[in-house]
Amino acid sequence: MSEANNPLTEEVRAMIGVSGEKLEASPPWGIEREGLRIFCNAIMDPDPRYWDDAFARSTKFGTIVTPPIYCSYLGMKTMQDEEDPISRAFAEDPNSDGIGGVRQGGDVGKTGLPVLPTPLTRILNAGNEIEVYKYPTLGDHIFSQARYSDIQGRITRDGAPMLVTTVEMTYTDQDDEVLCIVRQSQIRR
Amino acid sequence: MVSADALRTRQQLHYDDVEAGTEMPPLVIGPLTPTHLFRWSAAMENWHRIHYDQNFAIYHEDLPSILGQGSWKQSILPRYLKDLCLPDGWAWKVKFQHRAMIVPGNTLTVWAKVTGKREAEGLGLVDLDVGMRLDGDIESCPGTATIVLPIRGGRAIPYPFVAPKGA
């Protein structure tokens, strides 16, 4: 790979290891039943640990808990004090893909991480690595902190530059206990 | 699909019960429909049109159809491993790649096979190959996982989970 077409520029390389600030991922009212119900239905998991108070009390958790990485999805929601992201995206670009204008550069925009200084903005999800230590419960507040744990530059078979980025998100609760760690690898072209 | 009652009364799988080559009972989901994909996009407020706008997906993005979300798949493998460990085991970690696209009409078979096991600090760690096959034979999410199963006569698996040092 020649330096001229290497997408892993010095500016991009300098982002490896960079962390964002710790952010509250949950809404101001914390983990609640309705959001949990919607999520569990969408993954088709009827586990009574997520909704049956009496049964949940009889388990080792002692209370309602959430699915393993439920907390990692909370930060994607739009709060009511924000400008409607869909209307803005399509006002800026009538051919918006629904996400490019809604979130700059994909989900990274909501992680607190600085945006990568690269023109490669078309993103594909390459894979995930997940470690789970504790399940959140109702009323918990969830915090996330992101880090660029790895960035690699490649040239595809058809000669196009590509970056493979890995963002590591650590999720903690209000007691600073680690809930889970999610590493997401993305292909940027 | 698994019922709530089945998850209430699940019988514990123990470390002693598995060995390299043991195939875990699979989880079958599907066939998926556009409505399943739309439900996830709405639940997650993921407005990417490739997941619910068929004309956009096919004619603008040159895709075969609307696509199943990677973020949805990301929750299915942990959910499956969680079920395998119920009630007192722990689905510790999983790693997987997104390969074959999922489209409406696909039936997913989530699977796991034991590749090895080891004891660490009195805990039974079981290593797995895992994946999500489409329509029986196309692998969509190849990966590996480690679950923790109770050892008969051994100590309870701690909750919150504390990983054995060096494991």
Image (cartoon, coloured by chain):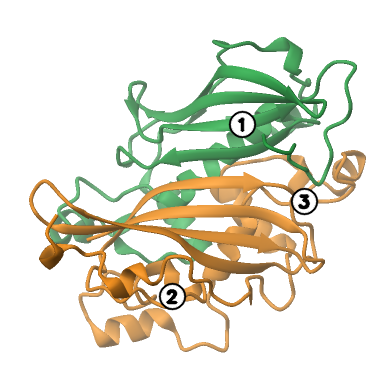
Task: For the C terminus of chain A, give its image quadrant.
Answer: bottom left
In the rendered picture, chain B carries what hue? green
Tell me the residue that label 1 is attached to. Answer: B146
Mark 1 and mark 2, same subunit? no
Horizontal and vertical percent for residue B166? 68, 37
Mark sitting earlier along the chain (3/2):
3
Q: State the separation of the CA atoms marked 3 and 1.
A: 21 Å
- Amino acid type, mark 1: Thr
The CA span between labels 1 and 2 is: 31 Å
Quick one: SS at disc 2?
A: helix
Q: Which chain is orange?
A: A
**Structural distance between the alpha carbons of marks 3 and 2:** 28 Å
Question: Which chain contains the residue that carries disc 2?
Answer: A
The reply to whether residue B108 is visible in this rendering is no
Q: Quadrant of residue A3?
A: bottom left
Residue that label 2 marks: A109
Residue B121 in which image quadrant: top right
Residue farthest to the left?
A158
What residue do we see at 57% from left, 18% from top?
B114
The residue wearing badge 3 is: A65
Q: Residue at x 46, y 44 (%)?
A: B73
**Between B20 and A85, the one nearer to me in the picture:** B20
Q: Nearer the viewer, residue B60 or B94?
A: B94
Q: Give a yes or no on whether discs 3 and 1 share a subunit.
A: no
- The residue carrying pointer 1 sits among few (fewer than 14), some (14 to 19) or many (20 or more) residues within 10 Å by Cα, namely many
Q: Amino acid at mark 3?
A: Val
- Assess disc 3: are there few (<14), some (14-19) or many (≥20) residues with their C-alpha within 10 Å of its C-alpha: many
